[in-house]
Image (cartoon, grey):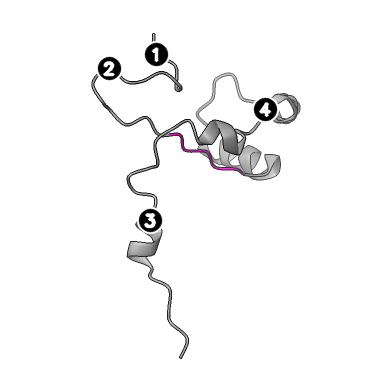
């Protein structure tokens, strides 16, 4: 089994995408989705958020750069100020 830091045998890119959101936003999204059975309780989400460690820049550097990293810039180019 391959881990994120091991080379891919077929030269496939290995990307890491991490998005951050506050626990309140996450819980609201979970509630609106309403697909968890049993439902996720707020206290459980709070415990998971306390245990979670976001990837450090050194860890992110182990992965390939996303192919679509500049997609937002392509769709919404910055306006030049004269």
Task: In the rendered structure, find residue 9 and report the number of the disc placed on it.
Answer: 2
Q: Secondary structure at mark 4?
A: loop
Q: Which residue is mark 4?
A: 52
Task: In the rendered structure, find residue 2 and report the number of the disc placed on it.
Answer: 1
Q: CA distance from mark 1 to mark 3?
A: 27 Å
Residue 18 screen position, x and y as percent = 52, 38
Q: Secondary structure at mark 2?
A: loop
Give the residue displayed 33% in from the left and 63% down from the top. 74
Q: Which residues are magenta?
A: 16-20
Q: Which residue is mark 3?
A: 70
If you read the primary sequence from the N terminus, does the residue marked by circle 2 or circle 1 appear first?
1
The single residue placed furthest to the bottom in the displayed view is: 82
Q: Secondary structure at mark 1?
A: loop
Q: CA distance from mark 2 to mark 3?
A: 27 Å
If you read the primary sequence from the N terminus, does the residue marked by circle 4 or circle 1 appear first?
1
Between label 2 and label 1, give the one nearer the viewer: 2
Give the residue displayed 64% in from the left and 25% down from the top. 40
Between label 2 and label 3, give the one nearer the viewer: 2
């Amino acid at each position: 089994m391959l881990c994120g830091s091991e080379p891919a045998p077929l030269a496939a890119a290995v990307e890491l995408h991490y998005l951050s959101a506050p626990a309140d936003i996450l819980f609201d999204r979970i509630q609106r989705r309403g697909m968890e059975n049993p439902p996720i309780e707020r206290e459980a989400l709070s415990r998971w958020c306390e245990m979670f460690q976001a990837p450090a820049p050194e860890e992110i550097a182990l992965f390939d750069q996303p192919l679509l990293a500049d997609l937002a810039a392509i769709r919404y180019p910055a306006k030049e100020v004269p």
